[in-house]
Amino acid sequence: MYHPGPTDPTPEQRLLLMSDAGWEDFIEECARQLMKEGEYMQVVPMGGAGDKGRDVCGYTQTLPLESTWDLYQAKHYEGTLSPSAFAPELAKFLHSVHEGAYTRPRKYLICALRVGPKLLDLIQNPDSLRAWIIKEWQEKGGNFGTVNRGLTSEFENFLKQFPFEIIRKMTAADLLEIHSRSDKHWAQFGVLGHRGPNPGVPETLTSDEQVYVSALLKVYAEADGKPVPAANVIPARHNGHACCQKAKGRFPNCMHRYTCRELLSRLVVSFRLRSTRFAWGARGVWQVLQAANRM
């Protein structure tokens, strides 16, 4: 008995298999997609030694003035991201902003596969997040590993006035939704994004539709055993199907937005012609695909 084999990993499952570097690359691709959509003027990957807590930066203008850029912090953990695991990165970020290493961003985005409930509660309550990090600073004496500085009254004042509401999380679903609009989504996950609405249906056939229509007429001719020379003489019993194809796909003008591989996976090889049902056969399908790929 035929079995199609195991199902392909979902995009969510593929994210779990990524390396740390792959995860940062994925986040950069998401930010670059937002840049294409007008969110940013420039996207710069910064991850590595000396990044001062910046993995990917999205700039809305040439000079990164305060609140004009977004900081993406990539965290690819097998488990959930906890407050204790996040504290060193947050300390490094706050210290860098205070020392003027870079300006305060518009948003500090935690990009993690899983954010634990305790950290999520802190992120969703900026006042609690502020109180927690100040307490951590006091208990650790300012030694977080990533940064070592005491909690002076001046620095504590800075923390008390800092707008912790800029710190937010981006879930895997959030990132995948952005990435699904990218031209890199198919290569990365084997899934194509939404095709979008079909274009309007013209009254008459346009020149770029002729090749595909000719291939479709050959399918009708094969079904009837006699030539169908033109679209205006399609046998009456095929009119319903022809109109449906025109309305659904506007012939090739919709189909050309798919790759050949996607067409093969989506194409229905059999269809109902009024009271008769038949299979196209490999040759008919191949003719239509060849015609669509020539558009």
Image (cartoon, rainbow, N blue to C red):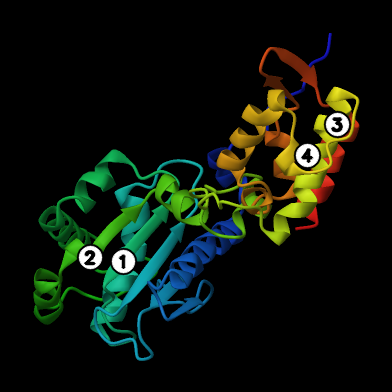
Q: Residue at x 36, y 45 (%)?
A: 115
> Residue 174 or 257: which is nearer the viewer?
257
- Return the disc, 2 or 4, that comes first in the chain's sequence: 2
Q: Nearer the viewer, mark 3 or mark 2?
A: 3
Kindly tell me whether residue 55 is visible in this rendering. no
3D distance between C-alphas at marks 1 and 3: 62 Å
Q: Secondary structure at mark 3?
A: helix
The mark found on residue 216 in the picture is 4
Q: Nearer the viewer, mark 1 or mark 3?
A: 3
Residue identified by numbered label 3: 221
* Badge 4 vs badge 1, beta-carbon distance below 8 Å: no
Residue identified by numbered label 1: 108
Could you say where residue 169 lies in the image, as x and y percent from the top left?
A: 32, 54
Residue 148, compared with residue 189, is above or below; it is below
Q: Nearer the viewer, mark 3 or mark 4?
A: 3
3D distance between C-alphas at marks 2 and 4: 56 Å
Residue 227, compared with residue 66, is above or below; it is above
- Judged left or right of residue 58, residue 263 is right
Which amino acid lies under the numbered mark 3 shown in the image of this protein?
Answer: Ala
The mark found on residue 166 in the picture is 2
Image quadrant in which the N terminus is located: top right
3D distance between C-alphas at marks 4 and 1: 54 Å
